[in-house]
Image (cartoon, rainbow, N blue to C red):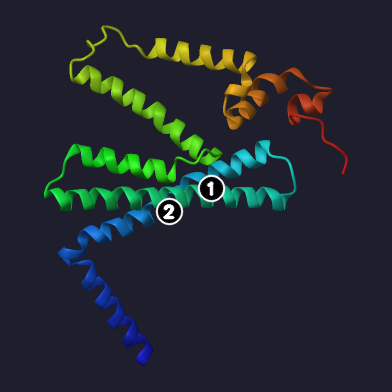
Amino acid sequence: MAGPDLTKTLLYTVNNLLQQEKYKAALAVLKGFRNGAVYGAKIRAPHALVMTFLFRSGSLKDKLKAILKATYTHSRNLACFVFTYKGLQTLQERCQGKSLQSHSFLAACVGGWLVFGDNNNINSQINMYLLSRILFALSRLAVEKGFIPQPKHDPFPLFATLVWGIVLWLFEYYPHTLQPSLQSSMDYLYHDSNVWHDITDFLVYNKPRTAA
């Protein structure tokens, strides 16, 4: 019965350690790493699955390898960023004795440079996703702080008009400037719909089925 007793003792020791206030900052960094890995895998895996089977050619094995690689890269990068960000934030707070807004900015800048500074497809998608969010947030903050007057009318229709007008203009005339995954999506929607041969690739399939 040594096994169960050892397990209970180990669990008690670990749980007791987790309750120690003096280790809370370091443990928060470790849990941040864990949450980054889990969240990265959760949001990347289904996206990679759909995009790979919709737009990527190749064998099933190649497609599965691509999905696993994309999921691993996103999960690893997010985990490393959270670890770096929280670690540097804690270090600055310990050095200066208090928490400052600059700590968050500087820690994230270092983490962004180290982790998301590599120009690849995964990092590009994540950085562009964040860019759209921070532009919205900064616009709202500018109104909140009084730097920009409160709009009298909802600006969202104008925003939507410009976004769609610009992106389709770029796609039709300068597609090389767009991210490959966006190009693939738009090709499927706007160019592939111009081509068909019979009812099968008009309604059932996007392109004619090739004989095995």
Name the kind of residue labelled 1 in the image.
Answer: Ala
Depth check, front residue: 13 or 202? 13
> Vertically, is 4 above or below 176?
below
Q: Secondary structure at mark 2?
A: helix
> Vertically, is 198 above or below 105?
above
Q: Residue furthest bottom?
A: 1
At horizontal 30% and vertical 80% (from top left) the residue drawn is: 10
At horizontal 21% and vertical 61% (from top left) the residue drawn is: 24
- From the image, which quarter does the N terminus lie in? bottom left
Q: Residue furthest right?
A: 211
Q: Earlier in the sequence, mark 1 or mark 2?
A: 2
The residue that mark 2 highlights is 38
Mark carried by residue 45: 1
Across and down, in percent, residue 130 comes to: 40, 33
Compared across the picture, whether 176 is left or right of 116 comes to: right
Across and down, in percent, residue 74 comes to: 49, 47
Across and down, in percent, residue 88 comes to: 27, 50
Depth check, front residue: 1 or 85? 85
Q: Secondary structure at mark 1?
A: helix
Q: Residue furthest top?
A: 152
Compared across the picture, whether 48 is left or right of 142 comes to: right
Q: Quadrant of residue 184?
A: top right
> Vertically, is 56 above or below 61?
above
- From the image, which quarter does the C terminus lie in? top right
Name the kind of residue labelled 2 in the image.
Answer: Val
Q: Quadrant of residue 103?
A: top left
